[in-house]
Amino acid sequence: MLADEFSKMLLANTLKIDTFQESRGYGPIGLLRRRIVEPNSASLDYALQEKDTIEGNHLTMCRFYGPDDNGK
């Protein structure tokens, strides 16, 4: 099963993982603007993980219009 194989690779430290999170919160203004996914939920507790952010909030961070678009 895929989940079992994935778990084995994590335990063996043989898999490099890249995780991404939103750089900005979502909401009307100021203090009401919050991240949809908090940084600790957007990553794993894993030694071979690379963490990075994508410019934008949760709704806009994965909308790309071409290879040079940064996701806004």
Image (cartoon, helix red, strand yellow):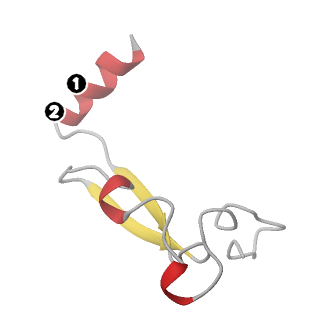
Residue 21 located left or right of residue 1:
right
Q: Residue at the far bottom: name it.
A: 30
x and y, in percent, of residue 17 in the image: 36, 49
Kindly indicate the quadrant of the structure image that contains residue 55: bottom right
Which quarter of the rendering shows the C terminus?
bottom right
The answer to whether 30 is drawn above or below residue 13 in the figure is below
Q: Say which residue appears at 70% left-offset and 67% top-offset.
A: 60
Return the residue nearer the eye: 60 or 14: 60
Residue 66: mark in rendering: none
Mark 2: secondary structure: helix
Neighbourhood count class around disc 2 (C-alpha, 10 Å): few under 14, some 14–19, many 20 upward: few
Look at mark 1 in the image and give the residue it sits on.
8
- Report the amino acid beneath label 1: Lys
x and y, in percent, of residue 56 in the image: 62, 75
Return the residue nearer the eye: 64 or 13: 64
Q: Say which residue appears at 29% left-offset and 59% top-offset.
A: 40
x and y, in percent, of residue 3 in the image: 36, 20
- Report the amino acid beneath label 2: Leu
Measured in 3D between alpha carbons, the distance from the residue under mark 1 to the one under mark 2, in whole angstroms, is: 5 Å
Look at mark 2 in the image and give the residue it sits on.
11
Q: Are marks 1 and 2 in contact (CB under 8 Å)?
A: yes
Which quarter of the rendering shows the N terminus?
top left
